[in-house]
Image: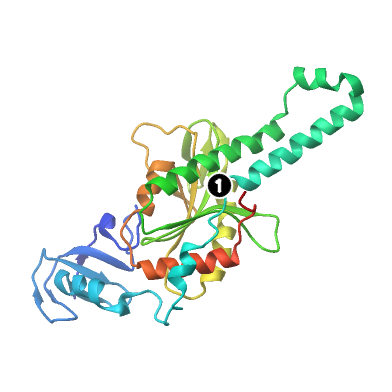
């Protein structure tokens, strides 16, 4: 029996928690043999571990596979020859586009009501009054999505593809951002809230009940609501072996000193710079895989708002 000492930060599928991941670079605790060249691997040797096949691969063989063996692609079926060209013409979407459109619609509707009620005095009323919070919240949300979108485009790995503001057909909902990178697929919900982000256990003596709080308010339902968006992306990807992660990213909130991203259910709760770091982790997807996934997802989840 071979016991393995796992280093999560070196895993092929990113995770902050001490969990066994499908494909990881780790230090052997006991001796073993490379599954490819049968080289004897001594304790404390760094090697690659595949949990599904329970196989160990030495660094030399793994490097050779990644550089030369096309079978390392996640997708075994032959890819369309035009996929590279399609990847270049993907409609990436407009960050915050649908939220901005909803703000403009509500703002315009309010001004029309003021015109109807106040007639010649409407201009004065508009000058002396502001849009209520339920209208300005859409503009604030759009601003947060735009800022996160710009940071993802600027700082995410060059090999990644970032899609923005994707419409889910058959619903009125949209997905703020989708990042396809070597680490996998990231379904991202941006929230421009203020206040301190924290996880609280509100359970009793004999049970745990972790909740997400922002600015002292319970926002757990926001994280729960991201799960169905992940499911929609999973339906598009199908049974392919690819990691799909959800991330709730607060663009303008505060975090306590030494705070770390945490899981709320199946969703990561984090901030922009840390999210980019998570997306940039090493992973099993090749550039061909990324282009194929991005093209497929972009086709099935079109931009919610047409680019200007």
Which colour assignment does the render follow?
rainbow
Image quadrant assignment for residue 290: bottom left
Q: In this view, does 232 lie to the left or right of 252?
A: right
Q: Is residue 95 visible?
A: yes
Residue 54 placed where, x, y %? 27, 77
Q: Mark 1 points at which residue?
A: 95
Q: Nearer the viewer, residue 201 or 39?
A: 39
Q: Is residue 159 left or right of residue 301?
A: left
Image quadrant assignment for residue 254: top left
Q: Nearer the viewer, residue 171 or 78?
A: 78
Q: In this view, does 272 lie above or below 45?
A: above
Quarter the N terminus occupies: bottom left
Q: In this view, does 102 lie above or below 16?
A: above
Q: What element carries label 1?
A: loop
Residue 166 placed where, x, y %? 59, 56
User: Residue sitting at 70 percent across and 43 percent down?
Assistant: 102
Residue 104 placed where, x, y %? 71, 38
Q: Is residue 191 visible?
A: no
Image quadrant assignment for residue 22: bottom left
User: Residue sitting at 60 percent across and 39 percent down?
Assistant: 141
Q: Is residue 214 left or right of residue 259?
A: right
């Amino acid at each position: 029996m071979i016991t393995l000492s796992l280093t999560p930060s070196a895993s092929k599928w990113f995770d902050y928690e001490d969990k066994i991941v499908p494909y990881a670079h780790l230090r052997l605790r006991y001796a073993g043999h490379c599954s490819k060249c049968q080289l004897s691997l001594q304790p404390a040797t760094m090697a690659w571990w595949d949990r599904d096949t329970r196989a160990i691969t030495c660094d030399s063989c793994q490097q050779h596979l990644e550089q030369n063996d096309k079978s390392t692609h996640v997708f075994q079926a032959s890819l369309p020859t035009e996929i590279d060209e399609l990847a270049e013409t993907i409609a990436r979407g407009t960050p915050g586009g649908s939220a901005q459109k909803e703000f403009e619609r509500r703002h315009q509707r309010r001004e029309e009501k003021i015109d109807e009620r106040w007639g010649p005095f409407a201009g004065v009323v508009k000058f002396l009054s502001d849009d209520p919070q339920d209208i300005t919240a859409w503009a604030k949300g759009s601003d947060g999505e735009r800022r996160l979108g710009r940071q993802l485009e600027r700082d995410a790995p060059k090999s990644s593809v970032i899609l923005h503001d994707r419409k889910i057909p058959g619903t009125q909902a949209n997905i703020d951002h989708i990042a396809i990178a070597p680490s996998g697929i990231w379904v991202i919900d941006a929230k421009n809230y203020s206040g301190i982000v924290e996880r609280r256990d509100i359970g009793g003596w004999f049970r745990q009940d972790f909740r997400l709080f922002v600015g002292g308010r319970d926002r757990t339902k926001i994280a729960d609501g991201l799960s169905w968006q992940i499911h929609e992306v999973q339906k598009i990807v199908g049974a392919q072996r690819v990691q799909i992660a959800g991330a709730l990213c607060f663009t303008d909130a505060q975090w306590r000193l030494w705070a770390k991203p945490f899981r709320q259910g199946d969703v990561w709760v984090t901030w922009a710079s840390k999210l980019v770091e998570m997306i940039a982790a090493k992973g099993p997807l090749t550039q061909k895989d990324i282009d194929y996934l991005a093209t497929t997802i972009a086709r099935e989840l079109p931009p919610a708002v047409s680019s200007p």
